[in-house]
Image (cartoon, rainbow, N blue to C red):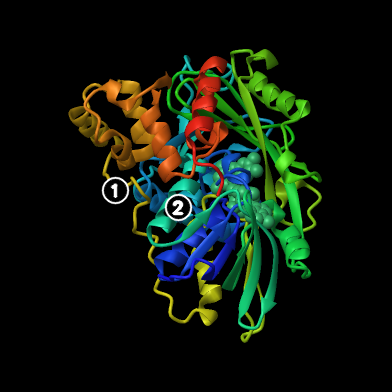
Amino acid sequence: MHSDPDTCDLLVIGGGINGVGIANDAAGRGLSVLLCEQDDLAAHTSSASSKLIHGGLRYLEHFAFRLVREALGEREILLAKAPHIIWPLRFVLPHERHLRPWWMLRAGLFIYDHLGQRVRLPGSRAVKLAEDNPLRPDLLRAFEYSDCWVDDARLVVLNAMQAHAVGASILPRTRCIAARREGAWWQVTLQTASGLREVRARGLVNAAGPWAAKVIEDALDLPSPHALRLVQGSHIVLPRLYAGDQAYILQNVDQRIVFVLPYEDDFTLVGTTDRDYRGDPAEVKPTRDEEDYLLAVIGHYFRQTVDRQQIQHSYAGVRPLLDDDDSNPAAVTRDYTLSVQGQPDQPPLLSVFGGKLTTYRRLAESALAHLQPWFGQMGPAWTAKQPLPGGDFASPLALEQELEEAFPWLTQAQRRRFVRSYGRLCWRFLAEARSAADLGEMFGAGLTAAELGYLCRDEWAQSVDDVLWRRSKLGLHLNAVEQARVAEWMQENAPADS
Ligand SMILES: Cc1cc2nc3c(=O)[nH]c(=O)nc-3n(C[C@H](O)[C@H](O)[C@H](O)COP(=O)(O)OP(=O)(O)OC[C@H]3O[C@@H](n4cnc5c(N)ncnc54)[C@H](O)[C@@H]3O)c2cc1C
C-alpha cells in the first residue's frame, strides 16, 4: 500500500460499474488506486439499467457472438460471487405468429443455451401457456429460458467496498476537472466540495461512461479516439401486474423487445426504450412518448389494462455506446472497446467505451491486461472466485434462517430485505442489537437509524437519494412524510462532503 495520499499508481475517473470494477481488480492486484466520482456512486447509467445479468438474447440477431458468449459465462460467475444481489430469473417469451417465427426463436435459444458456460441455470424449453396466465388468452405458446436479476447500484457499491477493503481510496462527489502528463506522472486536478486537490498518478483510467469522450477532450485536452453514441432508455414501475416470480420478454411490432420484471415484491418494472440522446447525461428523464410506448406494449400483451395514473415511478439512463454509425439506436453494438493512449515511456490513459453491467468484471480484467506493460509488478487476476462483500454464503434461504436465529425480533420483511441487499454485511448494523428498539428510530418499511448509520459509515451514503434510490429502493415503499424524515435524519447525521 502507498503512504502518500496524493500519489497513486492508478487514478480512476468514474464511479459507475466500470470504474469500480477496474479499481477493485487493480487494488486487489496490489496497485495503489484512487477513484473519483463526481456525484454519488452509481448515480448515472449504472443505477438506471434493466437490472439483468444476461447474455442478451436479442444481440444474437446482430451476430454479437463474442459479447453474448462472454456475458453468458459471466452469469454463473457473478451469481456465485453475489448471491445476495443477483438471483436467477425465469423468462417467458410468448410467441406471436406475425413476429419472429417459432423456428427462429427456438434456434436462437438453442444457441443461447450452448454458447456459454451454464451449470446452475436451467436451459430453455417450449411451454403451453396455462389458462390462468396473465397474458392475452389467444397467446397459447411460449418459450422459457433463464437469465439473472441484479441490484445494479448495489453491485457498484459492493465493488467499491471491496476495492476500499484492499486499500483503494474511494472519493464520491469529487470531479476530475483537469489532467496533464508531467514526465512519468499524470498531474490531476480534482474538485471536491471543500476545494481543489492535486493528485499524481502513474496511470489514468477514464471510466466516465456517457462523459468518456468529453473527459478526454475537455479535462485532458486530447483528441478522443472514438465517438460515443448516447442512447436513452427508460423504465416505468407499475403496481405488481401478476403473481409469480417469472419475467416476460415481449416482442413489439417495431422488432424491439421489452422486459416485464417482478420488482421489489410489490411492483412490476417495464422497460426499456431506445432513443438517441443529445443533452446532458445528468439531465436525462423519461419522456411521455416513452411511457406511452411501454404502456402500449403492456396493453397489447396483458389481460389487465393499465394507464398512466398507475405509473408509480419512472427513470431513464443513457447508454454510452461506441458509435458504429448504425441508423437504428437499438442495433448499435452493446460490446465494449478499450483504448490506450500513450507511448511506452509515457504514463498511460485507458478509456472505456461502451460495456454492460454483465461484463464489467471481464472488462476490468481486460483493462488491466492492457495496462500490464506499465505495471509489471501487478498480481494475477483474482476476481472470478472471490465473493463480493456480504456474498460469502451458500443460499439466501439458509442465511435468512441464520438471521432469524440470531435476531428473532426482526420482521420477516426485514430479514428478507437484509439478505437480498446486504447478505452477511447486515451483521455490521445488527450485531450489537438485542431488540428492535436497539436499532433506533424506525422510518417505515423496516428502515431504521442503525441501517442508515451503516450506509453513511460504510457505503458512502450522504443524501436521502443515496439511501432511498441507490443503496436501496425504499423510495418505492416510504410515503412522502416518511421520506422527508429520512432526508432530515441524513442532513443531521450524514458526513459532510470532504
Ligand atoms: C436503459 C438501460 C438499460 C440497461 N440494462 C442493462 C442490463 O439489464 N444489463 C446490463 O448488463 N447492462 C445494462 N445496461 C448497460 C449498463 O447499465 C451500462 O453499460 C453501465 O452501467 C455503464 O457503466 P459505466 O460505469 O460505464 O457508466 P456510468 O454508470 O454512467 O458511470 C460513469 C460515471 O462517471 C462519472 N463521471 C463522469 N465524468 C466525471 C468526471 N469528470 N469526474 C468524476 N466522475 C465523472 C459519472 O458521474 C458517472 O457516475 C443498460 C443501460 C441502460 C441505459
Q: Is residue 383 above or below residue 479?
A: below
The residue carrying mark 2 is: 159
| Pointer 1 or 2: first along the chain | 2
Query: Disc 1 to disc 2, how far (Cα)?
Result: 14 Å
Q: Is residue 404 above or below residue 317?
A: above
Disc 1 marks a residue whose amino acid type is Asp
Q: Position of residue 304 (x, y in %)?
A: 59, 13
Give the x, y percent position of residue 463.
55, 35
Q: Quadrant of the N terminus?
A: bottom left
x and y percent of residue 246 in the render?
46, 29
Q: Mark 2 falls on what kind of element?
A: helix
Q: Amino acid at mark 2?
A: Asn
Can you say whether 385 is above or below 142 in the image? Answer: below
Position of residue 84 relative to residue 134, above or below, is below
What residue is drawn where x is 26% and y is 31%?
Answer: 400
Question: Which is nearer the eye, 239 or 184?
Answer: 184
Mark 1 or mark 2, whichever is nearer to me: 2
Res 392 label: 1
